[in-house]
Image (cartoon, rainbow, N blue to C red):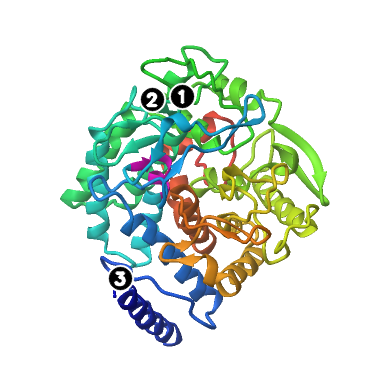
Amino acid sequence: MHRKILFLLSILVSCHSLIAQKKNIKTTYPDSIAPVGIIKDLSDSALLDVVQRQTFRYFWHFGHPVSGLARERSNTIRGEYFWDYANEAYNEPNLSTGTYGPEACAIGGTGFGILSTVVAVERNWIGRDTAIRRLKKMVDFLLHADAFHGIFPHFMNGATGKTIPFGRLDDGADVVETSYLMMGLLTAREYFNRDTEIEKYFRARVKQLWETANFNWHAAGGTTIYYWHWSPYNGFDMNFPIRGWNECLITFIIAASSPNHSIPFEVYGNSWINSASFFNGKTYYGMKLPLGFEYGGPLFFSQYTFQGIDPHGLKDWAADYWEQNKNHTLINRAYCIDNPKKFKGYGENCWGLTAGDSYKGYVAHCPQEDLGVIQPTAALSAFPYTPEYSMQALRHFYYDLGDKIWSEYGFVDGFSETQNWYAKSHLAIDQGPIIVMIENYRTGLIWKLFMQIPEIQNGLKKLGFSSPWLKK
């Protein structure tokens, strides 16, 4: 019965959305966002509206009911494959950590969800007052949750605030995940700038979290290495340095921007830049790649950091970061079109290799690790770099594959036509960039907010960046 009601509601909302589109009327959902199915003949703009709004439902309707934090995923999983940058190899899942259930919330994914909430308010999907109440609940919860020198763990129990270990040694602070959270909180601090009691309260709590986070602690008292993790039981025994090029540039920018616990430039230079995987300079499919792994690695490298950091005109002595990110995207797409392993479905309208779920578990898909699995977030979060090609992929995903991969929370995490496998899962760290990067393509909203923050401007200057946003 419930399914029939939901189906009828979807048809009603779909018709209403289509009528509103034709009348050029914006449909709004102040407190609740109803899901829609496949709506025929949408314009590009209307289709982007539908995809952003439905994807946001993941954070708004599936957020943890106690804390408001973003749940890690919509299903449960035992362990994850992840790329070990130090040894340049995949680590097997640590099954001893058990099943990640509905209480498991992602600190980084929560940051992405906060960015998405700003987009949702600006586009009138939810009310401003409703949104700030949710954000207030989050910061109140985080102020009393587990933190280690002010740095949060990778996973947290959304009901209790206790750390959920990611591994036997990874049971404490995760400075990368915390940097994603801070990117979201600082952006929301800029956006919710009204002189109301609740918005002033929220800004004060963000200030407290920001000023007490000891980012310099992860340099272990030196200037040579910046460590991803610290444990109250194991110290720096995990011995996992953050080296470039990957998704962690935002971590160094946030750490350099910290008002009370910033890192010196030497930490950035010695740990991030002084790495065998930082420089590339080779040409793939006729496109030069300044930085990173062969063929660029997973596409989230060019997306996570750049939800907040505007790559337009962003340069330093090492690279032009617009060129880096755009060429990385084009190389990834060209590889899928070339399709050397002859996977079914790959082509001009079906591309995008990045980290996500597969029929083998969670894998950092890329040309070097191609299992025939496409993650919709890869092409959709690339809209700022390749709008025409991303729209081509979006229309294919929505209209041609929608019966298999479109859901109440937007697109599922991945699919393989070769294996006839279609994920049932959604991941916070994949859903968030879809909303945010499409918005940056459309209006530049998050870039405008984040790049004008005085502390971030100081951090970028400290690390030697130039940008049209930087004030002299």
The disc at residue 229 is 1
Judged by depth in the image, the label closer to the viewer, 2 or 3, is 2
Q: Is residue 93 above or below residue 349?
A: above
Q: Are marks 2 and 1 in contact (CB under 8 Å)?
A: yes
In terms of secondary structure, where does tag 2 sit? loop
**Residue range highlighted in magenta:** 104-112
Q: Residue 17 location in percent, x, y?
A: 40, 80
Image quarter (top left, top right, bottom left or bottom right) of the N terminus: bottom left
Q: Secondary structure at mark 3?
A: loop
Establish if 455 lies above or below 380. above
Q: CA distance from mark 2 to mark 3?
A: 39 Å
- Residue at 73 percent of width and 56 percent of height: 336
Residue at coordinates 27% horizontally, 56% vertically from top-left? 131
Residue 223 horizontal/vertical position (percent)? 54, 15
Closer to us: 296 or 323: 296
Q: Is residue 223 left or right of residue 131?
A: right
Residue type, label 2: Gly
Q: Amino acid at mark 3?
A: Tyr
**How far apart are labels 2 and 1 at the CA level?**
7 Å
Lower position in the chain sequence, tag 3 or tag 1: 3
Residue 182 appearing in the image? no
Is 82 located above or below residue 330 in the figure? Answer: above
- Give residue 412's mark: none
Q: Which residue is mark 2?
A: 172
Amino acid under disc 1: His
- Residue at image x 22%, y 53%? 133
Query: Is residue 10 a member of the stretch shown in magenta?
Result: no
Q: Is residue 171 visible?
A: yes
For label 3, the residue is: 29
